[in-house]
Image: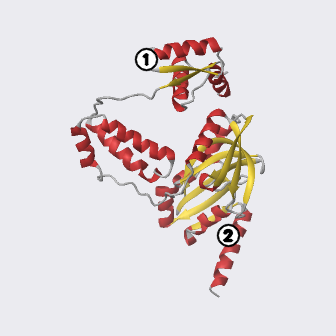
Amino acid sequence: MKDMAQTERQIFILLLLSENKRGYTISDIHASLEKWNVFVDKKTIGRDIDSLSSICFITEEERNGKTYYTADKFRLRDITFTSPELISLAFLLELIKPYQYITMGKTAQELIHRLLDNTSNLNREFIRHFKGLVTINTNDYISDVLDPEIEEGLQTAIRNKTKLKILYHSFGSDEDTTRVIHPYELLINDGALCVVAYCELRGELRDFRVSRIKKITILEEAFEIPKEYELNKARSKFIHLSGNTLEQIELEFDGPTAKYIKEYEADLADEILSTETGIRFLRNTAITDELLRWIMQFGSGVKVISPPHLKERIKQELTLSLNQYA
């Protein structure tokens, strides 16, 4: 049983009632809470709705012998911001600019503008003055064309922990495959929106780029996220790609390359140790083609210490590269 405080539970109910114009019955709300391992009886949910009705406009509608509840969107009027808060809003607008192709990013941008529309003219002038003083480097962002309905379906399945059947265009095979997945969360990886999900076809956790999902069907069957997922998700892959077998890799970087790694790539390591000539880079990860490309970009500034078969693969790749110029 998940321990959810009354206030947290009521916020969850209010957000649920606000998201769908058709509304939800108390049984629907009860089922949604249970999917998040929150177990309360329907009478408690009814009392929650009564409590929320005193502070929010909640409507009731009878349809086919059932009572459906909906909540109006919150209204904001005459908001006052401090200078640091206005600077932060301008910064947020710049920060989310690359994500306008994502429904969530577009909605976030619209939300900030709605906040500004309900503040004073002086504050809006301040924002216009500050805009452009901070620029975010967007070189790593990918402007994929996404289907808003697919985004919404993914969010619904993640929230309700229900399985999805997807038609997915694979990057590796360049083919469409039908898969059943358990969507855990959405992930922005180097600017591309992905869904992290267990793939029943492959029998392992995968990242599916949302722009490659051509069709989704929400299934009735539910799933549970493994407890170890939260513990392991941060280090399950190197940059983009993951593999089934994780190994300890040791690399030595020297001179300017070591300085670069410490400055820009240190977060990729599990541990970095100082040596006489540079650093030793330690990481437990799968050995993928992506890892090889990452190592080889540093040329003579890096040396593979272990595992031995990784050293051999690097030597083979270097030999093939030399043969290109023979």
- Secondary structure under tag 1 reads loop
Asked whether disc 2 touches disc 1, contact meaning CB atoms under 8 Å apart, the reply is: no
- Secondary structure under tag 2 reads helix
**252 displayed left or right of 219:** left
Task: Look at the picture and state if 125 lies above or below 258.
Answer: above
Residue 276 visible in the snapshot: no
The nearer-to-camera label among 2 and 1 is 1
Percent coordinates x, y for residue 66 in the rendering: 64, 19
**Badge 1 amino acid:** Ile
Task: Look at the picture and state if 289 lies above or below 46.
Answer: below
Give the number of callouts: 2
Q: Residue at x 58, y 66 (%)?
A: 302
Task: Look at the picture and state if 143 lies above or below 60.
Answer: below
Q: Looking at the rendering, which quadrant does residue 113 occupy?
A: top left
Mark 2 → mark 1, Cα distance in angstroms? 65 Å
Q: Residue 314 has which mark?
A: 2
Quadrant that contains the C terminus: bottom right
Identify the residue under disc 1. 55
Front residue (pair 206, 156): 156
Quadrant that contains the N terminus: top right
Percent coordinates x, y for residue 173 in the rendering: 72, 64
Front residue (pair 294, 263): 294
Q: Residues within 10 Å of mark 1 (few under 14, many from 20)?
A: few
